[in-house]
């Protein structure tokens, strides 16, 4: 006796709320991708961000940058800032963008571009973090509504 096939063609999927019900396990902190806003704050000399980068690297956690962030930073530097900017990027690892990263970014764009305004640069940075199993440090979490990103939060300093 054959049962009804009604409803079997499409599985019912309920998306989990990104903030409270993420279904993935917390991955170990093996490295952190610095978003463009973090890099800019370091280069501008923001003491609390610089202190947090030093503390992160002192804990033997490597930091990385993406080619997207490199492009965004270089688009806004002044000629006298070139050397310090080069030195900053050379002191960090570089995340290579490949076809897997591109595919994941495309999935993010298809899912979040209209509903959340995610743009290609942020989709690529998010995809670089998730395909590389790295955490993302950003000051603009609203640019990253994806529920599979691990975000880095620096420890709060006790100094006033």
Image (cartoon, rainbow, N blue to C red):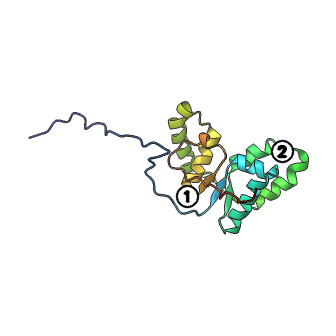
N-term-proximal mark, 2 vs 1 = 2
Badge 2 local density, few (<14 within 10 Å), some, or many (20+)?
Answer: few
Q: Is 148 displayed left or right of 141 in the figure?
A: left
Q: Is 100 displayed left or right of 1 in the figure?
A: right
Badge 1 local density, few (<14 within 10 Å), some, or many (20+)?
Answer: some
Q: Residue at x 85, y 55 (%)?
A: 84
Residue situated furthest right in the rendering: 80
Query: Residue 69, which numbered label?
Result: none
Q: Residue at x 16, y 35 (%)?
A: 4
Residue situated furthest left in the rendering: 1
Position of 152 relative to 71 (above/below): below
Residue 120, by quadrant, is: top right
Check the picture and name the quadrant holding the C terminus. bottom right
Residue closest to the eye, 23 or 52: 52
Q: Are marks 2 and 1 in contact (CB under 8 Å)?
A: no
Residue situated furthest front in the rendering: 160
Q: Residue at x 56, y 34 (%)?
A: 116
Q: Is 49 displayed left or right of 83 in the figure?
A: left
Residue closest to the eye, 42 or 80: 42
What residue is shown with label 2? 77
What residue is shown with label 1? 133
Instruction: Describe the element under mark 2 as helix, strand or loop.
Output: loop
Residue 101, horizontal then vertical, whole percent: 57, 49
Q: Residue at x 82, y 58 (%)?
A: 87
Residue 91, horizontal then vertical, whole percent: 76, 62
Residue 22, horizontal then vertical, whole percent: 46, 49
Q: Is 148 displayed left or right of 8 in the figure?
A: right
Check the picture and name the quadrant holding the N terminus. top left
Instruction: Describe the element under mark 1 as helix, strand or loop.
Output: loop
Q: CA distance from mark 2 to mark 1?
A: 30 Å
Residue 58, by quadrant, is: bottom right
């Amino acid at each position: 006796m054959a049962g009804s096939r009604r409803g079997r063609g499409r599985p019912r999927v309920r998306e989990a709320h990104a903030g409270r019900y993420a279904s993935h396990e917390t991955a170990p902190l093996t490295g952190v991708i610095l978003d463009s806003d973090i890099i800019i704050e370091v280069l501008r000399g923001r003491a609390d961000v610089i202190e947090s980068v030093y503390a992160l690297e002192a804990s033997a956690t490597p930091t990385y940058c993406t080619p997207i962030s490199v492009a965004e930073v270089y688009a806004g530097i002044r000629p006298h800032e070139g050397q310090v900017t080069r030195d900053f990027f050379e002191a960090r690892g570089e995340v290579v963008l490949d076809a897997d990263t591109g595919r994941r970014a495309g999935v993010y764009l298809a899912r979040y571009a209209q509903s959340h305004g995610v743009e290609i640069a942020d989709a690529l940075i998010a995809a670089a973090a998730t395909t590389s199993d790295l955490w993302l440090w950003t000051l603009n979490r609203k640019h990253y509504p994806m529920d599979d990103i691990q975000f880095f939060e620096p420890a709060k300093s006790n100094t006033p």
